[in-house]
Amino acid sequence: MTCQGGRDCYRVIRKCNAAASPSITIITLISVMAAVLILIKDITFTARITLRWPPEYLHIIGVGGRSSTHPNPTVVKNGEVEVEEEGVALGCDLSKGRWVFDDVTRPLYKEEDCRFLTAQVTCIRNGRKDTMYQKWRWQPHQCSLPRFKARVLLEKLRGKRMMFVGDSLNRNQWESMVCLLQSAVAPHKASWRVGAPLSVFSLQEYNATVEFYWAPFLVESNSDDPRNHSAIAHRIIAPDSISNHGLHWKPADFLVFNTYIWWMNRRTIKVLRGGGPLADHGSAAAAAEFDELERVTAYERVMTTWANWVKHNIDHNRTSSFFVTMSPVHQESSNWNGPKGMGCALETVPIISMSNSNSNASLSLSLNMGTDRRLLEITRRVINATRIPVRLIDITTLSEYRKDAHTSVYTIRQGKLLTPEQKADPATYADCLHWCVPGLPDTWNQLLYAHIIANANANCSS
């Protein structure tokens, strides 16, 4: 489904085996349902509502999803309409909502139970004492996110490959997905291999893999070695060269792209002159054969290259493609009136006042975390112009509220945990870019899950 303006939304599609029925029967059923809803509209539900109808009629009148105005979704089980804590939304913008404290259903797994996490994101193991950051649930204004069901997604992945492609924030999301899925499989039936540029989590029982491919600019660059990129002083991109990376992406059944944070080092970026891969230019590329372009100009050129590659190289009947928007940074504590020079280091709760507003106004205007939203608009424009079937997953505003969820001083630097002296200097050493796991990236994957399930239903009904 294509949503107006590229917004992050999706809809429920009727089940494939929905039986046909005469129109008069449908009208009758709708009338009865409307009468029932009028009778119960003022009741506050503390238990479930059960309305008994034959399942085939329920599929026809469309109550197998949820109401867009009721706080709880509705599902059909054995011919009954039930109000539950899970479900899927009906034409809802998932990117607008609020954070709700929830110490009952969050976190979705425990840090110590996920044996595949790297030391960069294991904040509790690295010394963080508070766990409140793990217990916030994203609540869209007009609907509810479906509960993440690992086994449902594993069935969608059976015999398939899911690949996250991009920078370290996409790796952050990949690690979260690994933990969400490994909780549903036996320990001896899952394994992972961290490599360069490709890391692979294998689920033997399902003959499936969940992979991460390092490509921080999507196109080729002199920073494409994930083990040796931090010390590169002058980053150079080849804006028209993507095919060498693309060879690794093409076999995947689910592709999840991102690129953002590496664009934010400077207002300009060095772009290889003359086209072609970096390797064709040898050492000369590092010396002089480049132009200095404004960030937005270079970004649009790169996104056009990426979109054209997706358009002409992906079998869209087989592969589902997604693009995850910018993950924000909380380095400037003055943006939320925090202690000067501390960044995210002392933060234990989200930005609450704005995110808890029930208004559907543009709350993003109230947040200023330094995110370059021009890049989001370029991404939307390129996707629309090239007409590629890529679903945009907007994580930006909901993540801007989460100043509390970063790895902060509870992480590693150059392969080692921060020393007490380094932790005492958060202005220098706090990582306000990456996120603790479990934590915020689990919500990103919940959004991705919602899109995958909706897309599967759409394919089923077409």
Image (cartoon, helix red, strand yellow):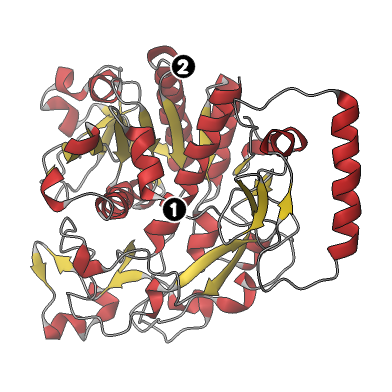
Under mark 1, the amino acid is Phe
Which residue sits at x=61%, y=25%? 17
Residue 317's disc number: 2
Vertical placement of residue 181 versus 316, above or below: below
Q: Residue at x 74, y 35 (%)?
A: 57
Please tell me how many numbered marks the rendered image carries.
2
Image quarter (top left, top right, bottom left or bottom right) of the C terminus: top right
Residue 460 point in image, percent of width and height = 55, 24
**Residue in the foreground of this view, choosing between 461 and 170:** 461
**Residue denoted by label 1:** 148
> Residue 118 lies in what quarter of the image?
bottom left
The reply to whether residue 224 is visible in this rendering is no
Residue 330, x across and y down, in percent: 41, 68
* Apparent side of residue 175 relative to residue 359 in the rendered image (left or right): left
The CA distance from mark 2 to mark 1 is: 25 Å
Q: Is residue 311 left or right of residue 54?
A: left
Residue 119, how many percent across, how many down? 15, 64
Residue 372, compared with residue 316, is above or below; it is below
User: How crowded is the residue under tag 1: few (<14 C-alpha within 10 Å), some, or many (20+)?
Assistant: many
Location of residue 234 in the rendering, given as x and y in whole percent from the top left corner = 22, 44
Q: Residue at x 16, y 44 (%)?
A: 226
For residue 110, which quarter of the picture? bottom left
Task: Answer with the quarter of the image where residue 278 lies.
Answer: top left
Mark 2 element type: loop
**Which mark sits nearer the N-terminus, 2 or 1?**
1
